[in-house]
Image (cartoon, helix red, strand yellow):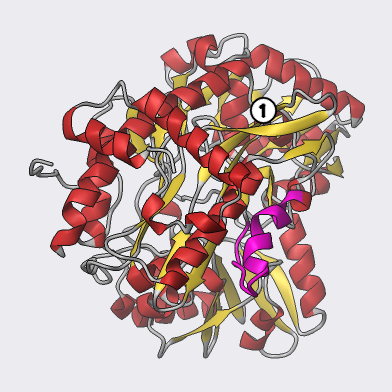
Amino acid sequence: MTDQTFPPAIFQSFEEKADPKNVAPRLKALRAAMAKAGVDGFLVPRADAHRGESVPASEARLAYLTGFTGSAGIAMVGKKKAGLFIDSRYTLQAPAQTDTAKVSVHEVLQGGLPVEIGDYVPKGGTIRYDPWLHTPAEIRDLQAKLGKRAKLMPGPNLIDAIWKDRPGAPVSPIEVLGHNRAGKTAADKIADIQASLAQDRADAAVLTLPESICWLLNIRGRDVPNTPFVLGFALVPRKGEPSLYLDPAKITPELTRALDGVAKVVSSKNLPTALAKLGKDKKTVLIDPATAPEAIAATLKSAGAALIEKRDPVLLPKSRKNEAELAGMREAHKLDGVALAKFLAWFDDKAPSGELTEIGIVTALEAFRREDETCVDASFDTISGAGGNGAIVHYRVTDKTDRVLKPGELMLVDSGAQYLSGTTDITRTMATGPATDEQRDRFTRVLKGMIAISMARFPKGTSGAQLDVLARQFLWQDGVTYNHGTGHGVGAYLGVHEGPIGISPRYTLPLEVGNVISNEPGYYKTGEYGIRIENLIVVVESPKTGFLEFETLTLAPIDRRLMDVGMLTAGERDWLNGYHQRVWAEIGPVVTGAVKDWLKAATAAI
């Protein structure tokens, strides 16, 4: 391989802008605001009103107060002490980012807000929360846990009162997708949702998730990193045109014309009035209690509306990708396969030098992806874990944690991209020298699990929860496992993580044709190495009547140097050889020179 110089990464920032030194003065300012408001505590969640995995800078209140920049967590601030509650992904990151002399960090199990929140206020005390940042289900669950220990009270956000240099709300261009990319008109999608509202006897539905609104109206935006979201709200009546509520700065004559006959584009300032009118008219309104802001539910109820609490009606139809969406996803994975071939060839050439860093590896991968002009962003911040850092499941490299990849270590890279045609997500674990017998054993068990899912054939009505054990069985046989889901849903040029389907015990809905899911078993040895192999797969009809199976979308070699081939069955070897033959057939003709030579060797049959 020839030397190549890479420009700075544009997709991912490695600098942590939050500073632990800011925590003490900001806590002091918040407590002054709490005293003025007459409350004993205040909740500061990571979420915004749209429950997104990424939030705009103007909504990063948890990072502003505590310094913690993870994608999930909540702070509880009392008069004398403060706590930051995170899950197992962030047990290393959170203490490193916050001032632990002022904020206690607690790892809690997922499943609602922790009851320990009540420990931060006197018995019978009041806890203020912003009703736009919490859901009805979340508040009900927490109040039930707290009982009489503390009372939850909605009110204005106290962080906003002290955040003097708060960034403005994002204003980005809005793109309207053509039929060749959406595959179904917005009018037809709206008609389907309206039919479901009629079945539920609802007069209207309030949509708050940007992925639901973007899919329904065939629009995309750039309001948050990594995901082409337009942030707004929508009201879908059982009859007539929906209303799309946006920041007035986003409403242009061009957008209004583009959505003419599809949806009315209205200032978000008018949303409370519209909700109040639904109540005044005694309408029955569907909201998702797991995702809608409590403020919306409270406004509707106080105005007199009857509520139907049910899952967002767009989520299931959106998860069933149509042929145009799948064609786009296949195109995106072919483009990604070309970038991955260039990257993996470059990596194999450079890794033995002992000069590669985790950040340098991310920068190179992003540069190869950016060679295609239709690549507009990463689909999430790349996980680039060398050696022991690879054992941190959701590791995010920063300037402070960046380290050199030592020859002989395993390198785990979990990454994805947003192409105009679709969304990708792939993990590869690479050798940089001879692997140990244990590493080859663990890698092969992970591979066998990934192949088992890839080859699965199952009757219609089967859920991801029922398939999950197929991926874990080979690790279980040796008394080890992994503590994350085997697969999550993936959007079509939308969110890289989307519900309500996937492969893990919590995904109980039946898989359906068109569902795109990740397939990513793993193994992690704390402090030493991590292994994960991930492809995206799509549910397709099986030749056997009444059955379904998977088609693999991802096109990139799996490192054969880490395999114990003797552990593979004949059927597993056939699958792997067939997969690599397909990678060579689809990607080989597109690459040239040393990359082509590397790819031919990497996809040779075992």
Residue type beneath disc 1? Gly
- Residue at 48% from the left image edge and 80% from the top image edge: 31
Q: Is residue 606 left or right of residue 278?
A: left
Instruction: Please tell me in which quadrant of the rendered image residue 189 appears.
Output: top right
> Residue at coordinates 32% horizontally, 78% vertically from top-left?
20
Quadrant of res 85: bottom right
- Residue 220 place in picture, x, y as percent: 48, 27
Give the residues in magenta.
Answer: 467-485
Q: Quadrant of residue 25?
A: bottom left
Q: Is residue 111 above or below residue 25?
A: above
Residue 294 in the image, given as x and y percentages of width and height: 70, 53
Label 1: which secondary element:
loop
Residue 473 magenta-drawn?
yes
Considering the image in quadrants, where does the C terminus appear?
A: top left
Query: Closest to the observer: 403 or 145?
Result: 403
Quick one: 179 or 454, which is closer to the camera? 454
Number of numbered markers: 1
Q: Residue at x 40, y 24 (%)?
A: 585
- State whether residue 10 appears in this view: no
Relative to 266, does residue 460 appear above or below in the rendering?
below
Image coords of residue 112 (percent x, y)? 70, 66
In the picture, the quarter occupied by the N terminus is top left
| Membership of 538 in magenta stretch | no
Q: Is residue 275 visible?
A: yes
Residue 142 place in picture, x, y as percent: 74, 70
Describe residue 218's horizontal placement relative to residue 379 as left or right: right
Does residue 124 appear left or right of residue 435 in this picture?
right
Q: Which residue is mark 1?
A: 514
